[in-house]
Image (spheres, rainbow, N blue to C red):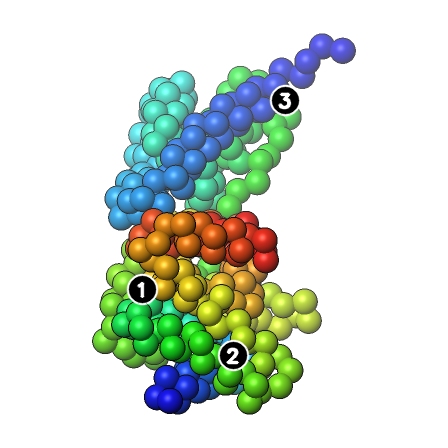
Amino acid sequence: MPPDPVAEFTVGVGEGLYGTGKAAVTGVRSALTTNPATTVRDVSYGIAGMIDAVIAAEDTPARIQLKRTTDAITSASARDIGRAVGSVAGNGALAAVPGAAPSKVFALHHLDKARPRPTFDPPQVGWVRETVRSSKPWKLYNDTATGARAGHAPALTRKMPDGSTRPVKFDGIQADYVADRKWKVVDAPHARALLLRQSDVLAQHRLIGVWEAPSLAQKKKALKLKKG
Amino acid sequence: MIAKQVAGIIVEYVVFLELTGDDELDPDTAVKMSESLAGSLEELEKGFLRELVDAFPIVAEEYTGEAREVVRDIPHSFYLEEALAADDPARLAELEALRDARD
């Protein structure tokens, strides 16, 4: 049976771009453990601006739009791509992006059996009042996480098995990453339970959590706790 | 004597943070306060910290059940033996092996 050119095209373009996206995400994830302040910020919403410009340039041929979009995607995260796709529809340039409106490009090429890919909604982050007060260094450390807000903590809503919801707090947030700062790692049951709560809520929201530690010693303890 | 009194205060705090239900105490806040306590304990003068670590098992006898286990585990949970052995690589390696075996 000959290969389906539409399906192969969709898969090829999608996987190729996801590959670029994944590489960008992986690079960012590893960078977060050493220099969280800079890297993620650079990979934020760049593609959204690109898409807007393309939409405005309606007279530009589709092949030019695709080329420009591909260049922009190179520095975007996979989720950033998905979000841009979710917020803009019906543009020929987006056909090169996973989950985009491939039917538009396929129509241009007389191909109309595209398989849509999943897109990602923006993270649903709430802000809860942070009432803990302290003049000690650990409080300053936690309060200066990237994306932190004075007097508040970013929180993700966790859906419990009984249908109720509970907030799970973090210290900072940027794009698809939420950060929990660990002044000192504690190896106690409630600390391990926190790990599980965070894992569960991150999975529910399809986000990535990062523990930031102030020293190599604390980082080693955190890694052991996560493996245990 | 003072070490046992201070150990008793720390124990009350730790038992509260570890065992209070989620409806009464936000569990994420409880962990944050434990991490803060860990930092404070680590900064104690080593001689006094040694006395505290030796006092926790004694104070543990004043508790029962799960609370007693929490108290007995304070040196482990807060890496206190590791803090005491900070300048002793051989001892640190031994403690790491003990911790790995326990986990």
Circle 1: residue type = Asn
Query: Mark 3 = which residue?
Result: A7
Circle 3: residue type = Ala
Q: In the image, are marks 3 and 1 on the same chain? A: yes
Q: Position of residue B45 (x, y in %)?
A: 27, 72
Circle 2: residue type = Pro
Q: Nearer the viewer, mark 2 or mark 3?
A: 2
**Residue occupying image coordinates x 45% and y 80%:** B55
**Occupied quadrant, residue A166:** bottom right
Q: Position of residue B8 (x, y in %)?
A: 44, 87
Element type at mark 3: helix
Query: Mark 2 = which residue?
Result: B57
Can you say which quadrant of the picture contains the N terminus of chain B? bottom left
Mark 1 and mark 2: Cα distance apart in space: 32 Å
Mark 3 and mark 1: Cα distance apart in space: 48 Å
In this orientation, which residue lies closer to the viewer: A170 or B10?
Answer: B10
Q: Earlier in the sequence, mark 3 or mark 1?
A: 3
Q: In the image, are marks 2 and 3 on the same chain? A: no
Q: Position of residue A118 (x, y in %)?
A: 57, 40
In this orientation, which residue lies closer to the viewer: B20 or A198?
Answer: B20
**Residue occupying image coordinates x 37% and y 28%:** A74
In this orientation, which residue lies closer to the viewer: B22 or A41?
Answer: B22
Q: Position of residue A154 (x, y in %)?
A: 39, 65
Contact (Cβ within 8 Å) of mark 2 with mark 3: no
Residue A151 appears in the rendering: no
